[in-house]
Amino acid sequence: MRKYIETSKLLFKNQLVYRFDIIISMVFTVSKILLAFVLWGTIFGNQKVVVGFTFSAMLSYYVISSFITQLDQSSNAGWQISTEIKNGSFSKYIIKPMSILGYFTAQTFGISAFLVVFNLLAASLWVLVFRIDFTFTSNLSLIAAALLLILLGLLFMIQLNYYIGILAFRFVDTSVFMMIKDNIIQFLTGALIPLTLLPAGIIKVMMVFPFYYISYLPSMLLIGRNGGEIVLGIVLLIGWNGAFWILNHFTFKKLIYKYEGVGM
Amino acid sequence: MTITKHCKVLFMLFKMKLSKNMAFRFSFFGVCFVDGSLFLIQLLMFSSIYSQVGNIGGWDKQEMLFFIGTFSLINALNMAIYFFGIITIPNKIKSGELDLYITKPINTLFHLTFESIDLGSVPLIFASIGILGYAVSGMSIQITAVNIIGYSFLVILMLLLYYDLMVILRTLPFFVIQANSLERLEGELATLCFKIPGTLFKGAFKVLFYLILPYGIMATVPTQFFIGTLTPLGFLYSICVVGGFTLFTLLLWKSGLKFYKSASS
């Protein structure tokens, strides 16, 4: 376990080198808030409440959701794995005395831990800039549940991106998969619109899959809603994490034999 | 160089790119799938919103669908014609690879623009036309030849504006070496403006997206023309903006080339 903690620490420190890049990423989170501000500002010009949201609750949802989405940097790990398999430099992970999935998990958690502070700053800044009457729950159990869901969700996203990354053993170039996944995940996790806008039947189907609990449910919990879905969310995310751990284990075992380590 | 010669060069560049693309058959239609998924998500997003509200800033569901189709069409044409050529410019400036282009007896910008025509994006053009057709089928407007010709003219005009903005941001590395952040900014702003009609922006945002970085007019103006809400002044304004930006692009590119110091840039 210690080697993974050291990896996390190392990646945490590494981020200090890319301070400018981190600040720029932080600034760019404004586009999501601006989109919500303009779009929902126009909609709320005609009506006071939409699916139970007031304008300030809606903007609070987007600020929180954007914060959680920015924390997840596992997509970079997926790209890194895919690229390194393609160019043959993935061999360095094979000879390391640690699990490859464990290494990338530690790496992503290290980066995310570093981003917490910057993303909090960005979120606070946008609340001030857009003069949002910020809605945030004072219920500690909801906050604790949201934090647990965020952690489990992050773990799931690492496993999903790792899975797509190692598919490069078979397909060489998985960039198309990665980009399609990024587009679809934006919608499924509620980063584009609160999922409560969808028809009830579709929401029920979405609740079986993990994406509902990664960003949407924690965001809703943090604005003081959907408390009744906590247990289901935690159980399902643990289940999906377990299923993907097994899938990754067997996929890696099966596909590693195709790797020649020479690159192209 | 005459137009005939340019056409010959264009055909050769297309043939070369096609044979190169065919080597990676799996990725051939990659752009189409990726962008297709993006528009599908946007359609879902607006369908969900319109299930709760009647209109957004005066735009009903069919008009918004037409707006998304227009954005999708402009983006598909951009991807098919010049996107993959233009995005390589900063790297070529940095590495000095631009030397190879400057020394050829052909206009450098023309070569860079058309060297990476992507046939894989063509299906997306047809998909966009399908979205437009579906949107029109639910509208109660009369379609005339003027509508279609005017709309097509404005789409081509906006394609030129998109080209101008892409080239401007990628000409900056001639002067500042690293402009990665500006390219990211372009990506974020273009995505934002293609998600919502420009008419929804107010105040400073309107100035920003209608004049300084006019991504806000790209899909909005052709849509407004088609549905009959574009004023003659709006039409004239669009032509002036595109004319101004095209002139600025050419001047900036020319002075950028003068500033180019090969591999030491």
Image: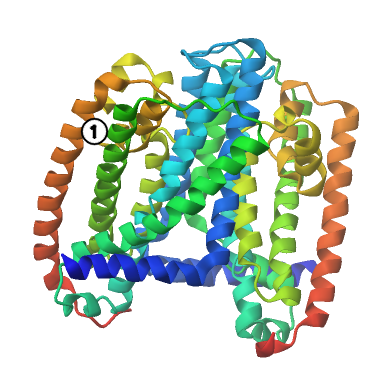
SS label for mark 1 = loop
**Depicted B251 relative to depicted B224: above or below:** below
Q: Nearer the viewer, residue B103 or A258?
A: A258
Q: Nearer the viewer, residue B228 or A13?
A: A13
Residue A79, position as x, y percentages in the image: 36, 62
In the rendered picture of this protein, how many numbered marks are placed on residues?
1
Confirm whether residue A168 shows in the render. no
**Depicted A99 relative to depicted A238: above or below:** below
Residue A40, position as x, y percentages in the image: 60, 24
Q: Nearer the viewer, residue A94 or B93?
A: A94
Q: Chain of mark 1?
A: A
Q: Residues within 10 Å of mark 1 (few under 14, many from 20)?
A: some
Tell me the residue at 18%/78% (across/down): A96
Residue A142, position as x, y percentages in the image: 32, 28
Residue under numbered circle 1: A209
Q: Quadrant of residue A112?
A: bottom left
**Depicted B205 relative to depicted A16: above or below:** above
- For the C terminus of chain B, the quadrant is bottom right
